[in-house]
Amino acid sequence: MSDQNSHDDLVPSTFEDEPIANPGLPPHVWRPTDVDPKAEKRAERQVAAFFGLSILCAILFLVSYFVFHVGSDWNTVGGLGASNVALGVFLGGALLFIGIGIIQWARKLMGDHEIVEYRHPARSSEEDREATIAALNAGLEESGIGRRPLVRNTLLGAVGILALPAVVMLRDLGPLPGDKLKHTIWTKGMRVVRDVVGTPILVSDLEIGDLVNALPEALFPTEENGYPEIEGVELQQQKVKAAVILNRMLPDEIVSQQTLNWSVNGIVCYSKICTHVGCPISLNERTTHHLLCPCHQSTFDLTDSGKVIFGPAGHALPQLPLAVDSDGYLIAQSDFTEPVGPSFWERDPS
Amino acid sequence: MRLLNRSAGRLSRHRRGPLAGLVVLLLGLVMTGSLYAAFSPAQADQTQSSTDQAAAGRQLFLVGCAFCHGQNGEGIKTQDGNQIGPSLVGVGAAAVDFQVGTGRMPMAQPGAQAPRKKPVYTDEEIAQLAAYVASLGPGPSVPTASDYSTAGMSDSERQAAIVRGGQIFLTNCTACHNFEGSGGAMPRGGYAPKIRGVDPKYIYEAMLTGPQAMDSFSNGDLSPEEKRDVIAYLGSLNEAPGYGGFGLGGLGPVSEGLFAWLVGLGSLVGFAVWIAAHTTRSNKKKVEA
């Protein structure tokens, strides 16, 4: 192994019987930096220069941190902000040049010779295996786990009891949702109101082709409508379950009888929550009455009971049965007749 | 003379070039177009009664629109039920002003999307077309600046309008038009267009009339004040400071992911190739010391 060129030493002799003689590894060819001291010096200077550039960048980073001010110059340097550009470029450069320098060093100057490593069988040798089993058996014998049932059983008990603290702590994740997933705040006779502003909707307000993002009136409690105050987490939870969209179309365009029965003058009302993973959906095409979910492209047909016509959603979009109250405002006939939103195990007991 | 000869020689050298035919064709087209524009008859008088306007609009309609929308704007259906052009009865002047004023109509070709382009008709012709279509049936009229302008408001009123408009925008518009109005993809090759930098009048008309596949937001749905607030919010987005960085079109994960995968990972792969590449080798042998 004194001469690095004689790689043939490393090739196993078992190949000698092969039909084609083993040609061995090709002779080593040197890099310019290995044979030319001038090239070596040059490479050394290159590596040092990269490290030097890194130092420069780090210093410039510090300088620009104190010179530029975030927020006051966000319009300079092509609208990107002098502070952003300077800090990013210099910190990036400081890290990048260290990396480039190290790679250059490895490629030009560090040791350059081929290494052959053989694969070994994964299985241990017979002696090792026997020795291990003997040691294990000796340990079992000395512990006397077979002869001392008291020790063994109390140990098993101690380990088993450890599961109880875990169960008690996991209980804090509860309580179980019960039938919360199956109901929303909608009730018979509750008015449908516009999202954000909370105003009730007259049937005559809507024209063919109109889309309204709507909520139940109970989420906009006033003294007048008498609904109880609701706020915080409870409000958000009710909102995400009860959000609906209204769409008015020509009554002739409605395909399914149920959709027609639950509509008022061509106004249909559907849950806004996709039945796939619960994204809010209101990408409606007025011309086709197809409602598209932007997350995974599930598409629902609003003329036909919210049937899934494309995409991964597993259930039709739940429709809210609409009616009109004595003042001409849109109201719900009842809560949704099926759970809104994504499927869950107990959704369809069969 | 020598100069002339030289340029003549240069011309003759290039006249058989691969692009020569195209250049001559373009020159011809440009000349024909500009000569026509210079000598074409001037347009009708400025002041017209609405009846005259509608009559003039009908003439324009018969030439430019009737092919798809029918001679009386009743729409044309093919035998297999496809719609060539929808009925224009009751769409109102606002729809015409939007469609023709933004160049969407007349369409260059039928397709999934009517893209915005340079308007074909002059403002006056658009007013005439709008008057004619409005005469077909009652529909929304072209909004005036007082409908969508926040000019007369105090600062605090305007701020309140922008906040309210932002909530309405995020509830009703972002689903298709993106959270900062950059537009987005729709089924079957369509797209919701970018609505930043659009004339407030056209935004108002789009909400009012629901162009192409867009739902309409009539005044009973979103009140005129709410429409004005949405427009005020969109206007405020243009004044919002951008604290640096590449916006990448404000399209969210689509353009950002594309950038990360192509530019980010691409440069990493480049570095990996460089690290693993062979260094230059020398023919010389090492001189053993």
Image (cartoon, coloured by chain):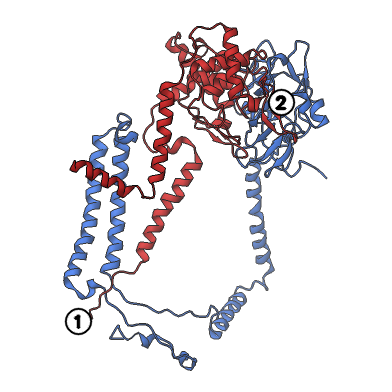
Chain colours: A blue, B red
The reply to whether residue B140 is visible in this rendering is: no
Q: Foreground mark, 1 or 2?
A: 1
Residue B44, image x, y percentages: 50, 12
**Closest to the observer, B228 or A181:** B228
Instruction: Give the alpha-carbon distance from disc 1 to disc 2, as whole Å.
Output: 89 Å
| Left or right: where A90 falls relative to A181 | left
Q: Quadrant of the N terminus of chain A?
A: bottom left
Label 2 Cα crowd, 10 Å radius (few <14 / some 14-19 / many 20+): some
Q: Check if mark 1 and mark 2 are on a common chain.
A: no
Which amino acid, mark 2? Ile
* Mark number, residue B287: 1
Compared to residue B253, the image places residue A198 above or below, namely above
Residue B46, image x, y percentages: 48, 9
Q: Quadrant of the C terminus of chain A?
A: top right
Identify the residue shown where x is 30% and y is 66%. Answer: A106
Helix or strand or loop: what does disc 2 sit on? loop
Which amino acid, mark 1? Val
Compared to residue B193, the image places residue A276 above or below, namely below
* Mark number, residue A39: none
Q: Chain of mark 1?
A: B
Residue B112, image x, y percentages: 61, 36
Helix or strand or loop: what does disc 1 sit on? loop
Label 1 Cα crowd, 10 Å radius (few <14 / some 14-19 / many 20+): few
**Closest to the observer, A14 or A207:** A207
The residue indicated by pointer 2 is A185
Identify the residue shown where x is 50% and y is 6%. Answer: B47
Q: Quadrant of residue B90?
A: top right
Q: Chain of mark 2?
A: A
Residue A207, image x, y percentages: 68, 18
